[in-house]
Image (spheres, rainbow, N blue to C red):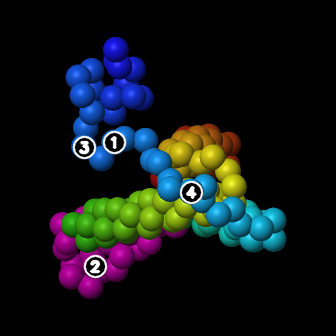
Amino acid sequence: MRTDPTDTGGLFVGRRPGSSPIRYRSAPEQAGSRRKRADGILASGLFGVVVALCLLCWGPIPLVALWLGSRANYLSGSVNVGIIVTFGSAALFLYGNLSAMQRVDRAWVLVRRAAGHDQRGGALPRIFGVTAVIGITVFTFWFMVIVGPNDPNL
């Protein structure tokens, strides 16, 4: 009886179409060691790009959105326009950045596979979590130690 979810594509009865194990006619051709090394280097570079894009979410993108909102407020003379521009530009930039991170992460998985690693999932959730913890820690240190919560200029 085949009830193991890995055998049945996650269902207890039958199999979802297109979820059967991959069967090759012959063994796939393996790349040489130089090609695998080059793919490993490229994967490291793509990993660095994902980290850099993640770090943009915790500082530069919100600052650019605030700057654009302040310019819109100054040019229009309306606080409401400034707020709308700030939130709209922040959403646009953050969602665009997330889309770029997902695409680079998918490419990273493919390049890791080409380098000979059994890579099944991306690293984006872990990278995003680590950069969130770092961002929160840096902000807390800045707010509590450098500026101070009782600063009259805030």
Which numbered disc, 1 or 4, marks the residue closer to the eye?
Answer: 4
The amino acid at mark 3 is Pro
In the rendered structure, which amino acid carries the disc numbered 4?
Ser
Is label 3 in contact with label 1 (beta carbons under 8 Å)? yes
**Which quadrant of the view contains residue 111?**
bottom right
First reached walking from the N terminus: tag 2 or tag 3: 3
Is residue 153 among the parts visible in the rendering?
A: no
Which residues are drawn in magenta? Answer: 58-83
Q: Amino acid at mark 1?
A: Ser
Sequence-wise, the earlier of marks 4 and 3 is 3
User: Three-letter amino acid code at disc 2?
Assistant: Ala
Secondary structure of the residue carrying numbered label 1: loop
Q: Are the residues tagged 1 and 4 within 8 Å (C-beta)?
A: no
- Cα distance between the residues tagged 2 and 3: 53 Å
Image quadrant occupied by the N terminus:
top left
The residue under the point 54% across, 45% down is 120
Judge the density around disc 4: few (<14), some (14-19), many (≥20) Cα neighbours within 10 Å. Answer: few
Closer to the camera, 45 or 2? 2
Question: Which element carries disc 2, helix, strand or loop?
Answer: helix
* Residue annotated with mark 2: 72
Distance, label 1 to label 4, CA atoms, is 20 Å
**Is residue 40 at all visible to an observer of this figure?**
yes
Discs 2, 3 touching: Cβ within 8 Å? no
Q: Which mark is residue 19?
A: 1
Badge 4 marks a residue whose secondary structure is loop
